[in-house]
Image (cartoon, rainbow, N blue to C red):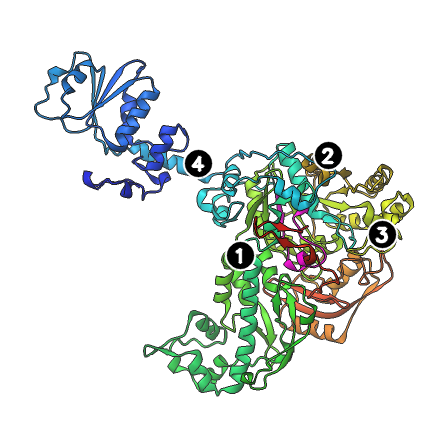
Amino acid sequence: LALDLQESLYSSKVLNAVKPEKDVDGLSSINLGRLIHGDAYNYLVPPAACAVMELLEDLGGKTVLLVGASGAVGAALQCMLQREGAVTVSCQWKAPQLQTKLHDADVVVVCSTKRDDVLLSWIKPGTTVISCSLHLLSGKSVWHIGERWIQSQQYRKWDLRCLKLQPLSPVPSDIEISRAQSPKAVDVLAKEIGLLTDEIEIYGQTKAKVRLSLLERLKDQPDGKYVLVAGITPTPLGEGKSTVTIGLVQALTAHLSINSFACLRQPSQGPTFGVKGGAAGGGYAQVIPMEEFNLHLTGDIHAITAANNLLAAAIDARILHENTQSDKALYNRLVPAVNGVRGFSAIQLARLRRLGIYKTDPDTLTEEEVRKFARLDIDPSTITWQRVVDTNDRFLRKITVGQANTEKGFIRQAQFDIAVASEIMAILALTTSLQDMKERLGKMVVANDKKGEPVTAEDLGVTGALAVLMKDAIKPTLMQTLEGTPVFVHAGPFANIAHGNSSVLADKIALKLVGEKGFVVTEAGFGADIGMEKFFNIKCRASGLVPSVVVLVATVRALKMHGGGPNVTAGAPLKKEYTEENLQLVAGGCCNLQKQIQIAQLFGVPVVVAVNIFKTDSAAEVDLVCKIAKQSGAFDAVPCNHWSAGGGGAVKLAQAVEEAARQKTSFKYLYSLELPIVEKIRIIAQKVYGAQDIELSPAAQSQVDRYTQQGFGNLPICMAKTHLSLSHQPERKGVPTGFILPISDVRASIGAGFIYPLVGTMSTMPGLPTRPCFYDIDLDPITEEVKGLF
């Protein structure tokens, strides 16, 4: 932006209204300040000053007189001349000592119109005289700024300053470790990894949303390597996949100087205040600040809750209004006159077109067309859309709505799900753009009409409103690890009742930012049979991305459980079998590890086993696990101490992953989408879970037939199954065989793009235990510090 104004209009208010990076004239306070401070690559210089400097050579020790120079140009000239070793003197035309100064100068730069009474004889022979306009517009300057802008839009090499760790022994609590580290300001981190100022929206000091425009800017940048962290069938305590994910990127970037990004799910507040606690990792492999990560973050789950419940309210309200109004009254309220003029909204015109009605004047519809347009005729018994809340609340698993007199007797049974089980969460995790998200939101099937046809969010006219509520949630949130390496936190579907992976968009943005030789490490929920299978068959289909390596997390503790050890219960002390060396239990439980390696190999991706070390593990137990893993087809198996040592404890894992990523992969999906729904379910049950066969309840078979008839048969499958066993029975550990997998119901998330069968009795609303985590969570009213999170 070049300014061409009268001299009197060049006020600081006008000059500073121009963005510094667009300031061709170089007159803004920011550009001038950067010039004076010597910030060599971040300022623009007035073209007149550049022209003067280009004409002058060998200025060391010479006296340069600036006559009539003022404002930013004069200041810029003085600074640049002094930097070249010149002695600068500034003088106005009316100055009484002007004649003397002109005579003494070696170079005279005339910056404004010469007074008539000033004689050229005042200047000594041999003096260089330059006459310039203060507001010269140089084509070269414009070209230079254009070139600089183009360079700024291209991929930038990282200039990351990692944070130092000083691990203590014994290891303090997670929140104490998090508090002991001072995170970088998020705008500093963003700049270090090549994000532009207008590509981030800052939330406080340590969080920022990243805009999707980056994908367009870096569309020609090759992707980095794509790594998935999965696990064996876990104990109820979890085996540390998030911790391994964070430890791995800390090792790659802070210790091996390889660009890497962790992409994690946002934790639900249900588990945070329930049993499991937070999901920021643990020990010296954490996302910080961990309390901000675990509580609210940037409000994405709240946005999902608001959007989900708006749609739920729209369903019941529409049924009520259709039940209590005539066709004409209903139509007049749906298409009211505003200032005497009636008109359809854009979403109503779209509905008319879907009905085959190509009219735009509301007064021209026939009675039959009015009825077809105004009535959705939702069958209440087919409503599948539930209200949600981000709290474990078992008493909302079955409720009755509509009991107030104002609802005129429209009472029905309903339920609440936990917010992260909402289809809108799944859409957020799988969408590829704002337009794609809006289309997916519109396709969500909420019920059937009385003819058995699907009713969608688009039919209810709520698509645009849902998109508005989700417009900020679609942007990934940038945070950092304890060692200052970047993390994206985005989306948080559970893996047992949804597909259990962070967002496609976070992965795609990160893959561009790390560069061709970098790594993006993302995590899939629960065991490889749950989260990893859905990552490959659902997420990779949606994204088109192909993973390079699977890191399979195992613990001695979980393997002992699968080898016949006593039950592991959250909140209860571990039995001695888990705290003392027992090679027999470990060897017996490695069957589960072997099975999970085989599942990963079904997809043609190399596997690196990461043994997450606990202080009670013996060296012999760890060595045995690594030996069996390698014998079972793992590319490598590595013990990891990142929990106690940070990234330094995962360097061997990072090196193994780097080596495995060089291997040629032959990635393939487990099943073809063209297969019938039942056959796709059977393939997952037999090849992944090890079932003998499947058995559908009459209700499940009826739903399969209905979805097939409605045209939804070609969608991938998202099994809703317990994560505590390869089978449907949580108590069956190891590798169960010979079981029949019961499918109690089949539902569809058409917007998200999958069919989800319910295996056995799966609850979509967790409950609180006798002693939830919230007993230990508190706030210091003086310091405002959160206590008790883990």
* Tag of residue 561: 3
Q: Is residue 322 left or right of residue 37?
A: right
Give x and y (percent) for residue 131.
19, 25
Is mark 1 in CB contact (under 8 Å) with mark 2? Answer: no
Residue 697 as seen in the image, left or right of residue 448: right
The first of marks 2 and 4 along the sequence is 4
Comparing marks 4 and 3, which lies closer to the viewer? Answer: 3
Q: Residues within 10 Å of mark 1 (few under 14, many from 20)?
A: many
Cα–Cα gap, marks 3 and 1? 39 Å
Which of marks 2 and 3 precedes in the sequence? 3
Q: Secondary structure at mark 4?
A: helix
Q: Is residue 263 magenta?
A: yes
**Helix, strand or loop for disc 2:** helix
User: What's the magenta region?
Assistant: 262-281
Q: Give the foreground label among 3 and 2.
A: 3
Q: Which of the 4 image quarters holds residue 277?
A: bottom right
Q: Kindly state the secondary structure of the residue where label 1 is placed.
A: loop
Horizontal and vertical percent for residue 283? 70, 42
Q: On the image, numbered disc 2 is attached to which residue?
A: 652
639 horizontally vs 32: left or right? right
- Can residue 707 be spotted in the picture? yes
Residue 342: x %, y % from top left? 36, 78
- For marks 3 and 1, the one nearer the N-term is 1
Location of mark 1 (residue): 473
Q: Quadrant of residue 735?
A: bottom right
Q: Is residue 623 above or below residue 330?
A: above
User: How far apart, in angstroms, are the residues tagged by discs 2 and 4?
Assistant: 37 Å
Dot 3: within a 10 Å radius of its alpha carbon, few (fewer than 14), some, or many (20 or more) residues? many
Quadrant of the image containing the N terminus: top left
Marks 1 and 4: which is nearer the front? 1
The CA span between labels 1 and 2 is 36 Å
